[in-house]
Structure formats: C-alpha cells, structure tokens
Amino acid sequence: MVLSSANKTRKAMTKVHITIPLESRIRHTIFVNRIDRYILGLFWSSFAAGLVIFVSLFLATDVMSTVIRFNSVDGSIFFNYYLYYLPEIIHKMLPVASVVGMVLAISTLNKGSELIALFAAGMSLFRISRWIMISLAVLAIADYISSDKLLPSFMRQKNFVYFNDIERKPSKFQTIKYDKIWYRSRNTIFNIKTLNSEGNLAQGLSLYFFDEKWNLKQLLTADSVVMEGSKWLLKNGTISVFTSESSFPMNDKFKEKSIVMSEDAKDLRNTGQTADMLTHNELAQYISKNKEAGLDTVKYEVDYFSKLSYALAGLVMSLLALPFCVGQARNGGMAKNVGLVLGLVLFYWILYSSMQTLGNHGTLPPLIAAWGANVIMSGIGGFFLLRLKK
C-alpha cells in the first residue's frame, strides 16, 4: 500500500512538472507579453509620427499649389475641400507610414542592442516582429473596409466642391452611379448608361434640349455614341420634337446622326475615375454592365483588383524591408538601413505602377497587373527573411 501510494505521488509530480511549463509556453505564445507590448509601443508611435508627417507634407504642398492657382477663392471653401480630401490622403499615405513605423521600431531595437539580447534569448526576427505584422494586417483590413465604404462618398463631395466652388465649372462635375451617368452642359442634360474608360464610347444615350426658360424642346435617344471632342456620332436612335402648337411630340428615327455639342461636353472624359467613386460591389456591377454593352473594361478590372492589393501594400513593403532592418547599428548603420529600405520601397512603387500601366493598356491581365508587384516583392522579402536565419 505504501509503495503504491508513493508511485501515485511520483506520477502526479511528473504530470505537474510536465504540465506547468507547457501551459507557460502556451501563454507565452498566445498572449502579448511585456516585450511584445514594448515593441508594439515603438511601432505605433513611429507609425503615428510617420503618418502625421507624410500627410502634413502632402497637404502643405497641395494647399500651396491650389491656393496660388485659385487665389480668388474664399478660405472657407478650401477648408471644406481639404476636409473631404483628408481621408483620401490618409489612404494614400498609409502604406508608407506602415513601413516607416516597422523600420524605425526594429532599427531602434537594433541600435540599442536590444535586438541582440532578444536573439540571445532564442527569439527569431519573425517572432520579434510578429505583432507588428499582425498590426499591419489589421491596418490593411481596416483601410480596405473604410476606403471601400466611406471613401467614395468623400471623393464625390470633394469633386463637387472643387468643380462648383473652386474651379467654378459645375458642368465638369458628374454624379456617378454604377449604371447611369447624368451630365449637364449649359441648357442640355444627357444621361448615359455606360461609358468606357477613355470617355469616347457610350451606350444608352438620352439627350434633353431645353430653351432659355427650361421648357423641353427636343429629346434625342441613341443606342450608342462615338465621342470625338464636341463632335458626337449617334447610332440607331430617335428624335422627339416638342412644340407648343401640339400636345404630342413629332418623332423620327435614324441610323446615324452627327451632332456638335458645346465645348463643355468635351470635359466628360476629364471628370475623374469612375472606379474611385464606387464601392467594390458597385464596381463589379459596373464592369458587368459595360461588358454586356460590348465596351472595353480592362482599366476598370485593374482598378477592381487593385482596391485590395493597394490595401495590402504596407504589409508587403514591411515584409520586404524587415530583413534589411538588421545590420550594423552603429557608425551610421541605422541611417544606412533606413536609406536601403526606402530604396526598396521606391523600387516597389515603380514596379507596382509599371504593372498597372501595362494592365491598363492590355499588355498584362488585370489580375496580374494588380497583384504582380505584391507577389514578387513578398517572395523576395520571404527569401531574404529565410536566408537571414535569425
């Protein structure tokens, strides 16, 4: 009995001895410990400072050029314009601020020899930066959702203020929906169901002509329109003429008809990118309708895939820059690391922009044009990270 009891106690002690370190390791793996909180503090402070600096520089440059160009516009109008413009600027600067935050956080650890101590404690570089990468992924998701749901509304308001109050050419402002485009040019209002990315081929035109008292004089409809500046070629349409002498309009059909629009109508192709003012789902429907109408949708498809790929740009650039943050911290080593990383970021943006340009011209498939740079740079970053062996 005594021997049996001793064996049971020994087994229980063995279980406790095994279980406690295992639970400790699990807690260490899952939860954010004190070291992780310290590293996250370095990252978020650097990220916030970088975002404020880059947004401020962008705003200062843009405000200066805009105010000089439109010096007669009231200051309150500029305030409203940049209030609507600010979310778009933050969206553009977020990837750069993300990679700067990561680089400065890891470089600060490296400069203070804290990185060496963490390596000596058995932590890999990926483990050290794990919560930074998780933070970047959360930032990417938040940026994608906010830019998809909120940014189109802010951009419409921004364009409205710009064309109506700053440039004072309200005819250049178009209210864009995924299935209809309404546009006003002097005493003419027209509705287009679909418009290609170059702004020179449209489907489903309804053209309303009014007199000086805004009485409807003529309604012109056409299945398709070829736009060459102010000269439009209409195909397969109907003309309806309204007169005060008759209660019914006079109708006449045509196969082809050329009309000359006012000079303002040429601004239709310069009213901004439709994709920027549409959510992801609306853009998908817009592409589908354009395809059904037989229009070229390549540029819109590139924009469609780029909405998500751009949101992940900060995470991709950070993964690319991470292996190069570890190096000689003294004798200007930190400055060299930051300079090298900024060079890699510049190379990423050149590749990203080049592939999108090739995609817009049909040289690359839209999916590859939007995601190619992210895939290539993620592969390069992963290769150097594995090669570092830290």
Image (cartoon, rainbow, N blue to C red):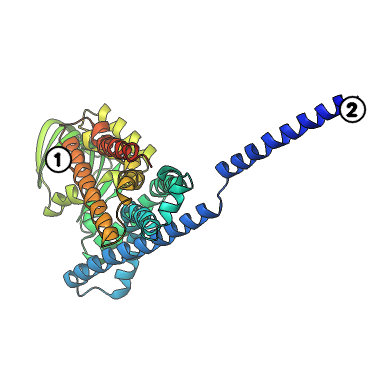
Q: Where on the picture, by quarter, is residue 17?
A: top right
Image point (12%, 48%), residue name: 261
Tell me the mark number nearer the camera, choosing from 2 and 1. 2
Rendered position, 330 above or below 224? below
Badge 1 amino acid: Asn
In the rendered image, residue 60, in percent from the top left (x then y), is placed at 26, 69
Q: Which sits in the foreground, 134 or 297? A: 134
In the rendered image, residue 339, in percent from the top left (x then y), is placed at 23, 56
Q: Where on the picture, by quarter, is residue 211?
A: bottom left
Rendered position, 104 above or below 72? above
As drawn, is 66 to the left or to the right of 17?
Answer: left
Q: Is residue 377 visible?
A: yes
Residue marked by disc 2: 2
Image point (42%, 43%), residue name: 126
Q: Residues within 10 Å of mark 1 (few under 14, many from 20)?
A: some
As drawn, is 97 to the left or to the right of 64?
Answer: right
In the rendered image, residue 284, in percent from the top left (x then y), is placed at 34, 34
Q: Which sits in the foreground, 163 or 308? A: 308
Badge count: 2
Q: Is residue 142 visible?
A: no
Determine the CA span between mark 2 and mark 1.
97 Å
Q: Where on the picture, by quarter, is residue 54?
A: bottom left
Residue marked by disc 1: 200
Badge 2 amino acid: Val
* Residue 115: mark: none
Q: Which sits in the foreground, 70 or 203? A: 70
In the rendered image, residue 237, in percent from the top left (x then y), is placed at 18, 32
Q: SS of the residue at dot 1?
A: loop
Q: Residues within 10 Å of mark 2 (few under 14, many from 20)?
A: few
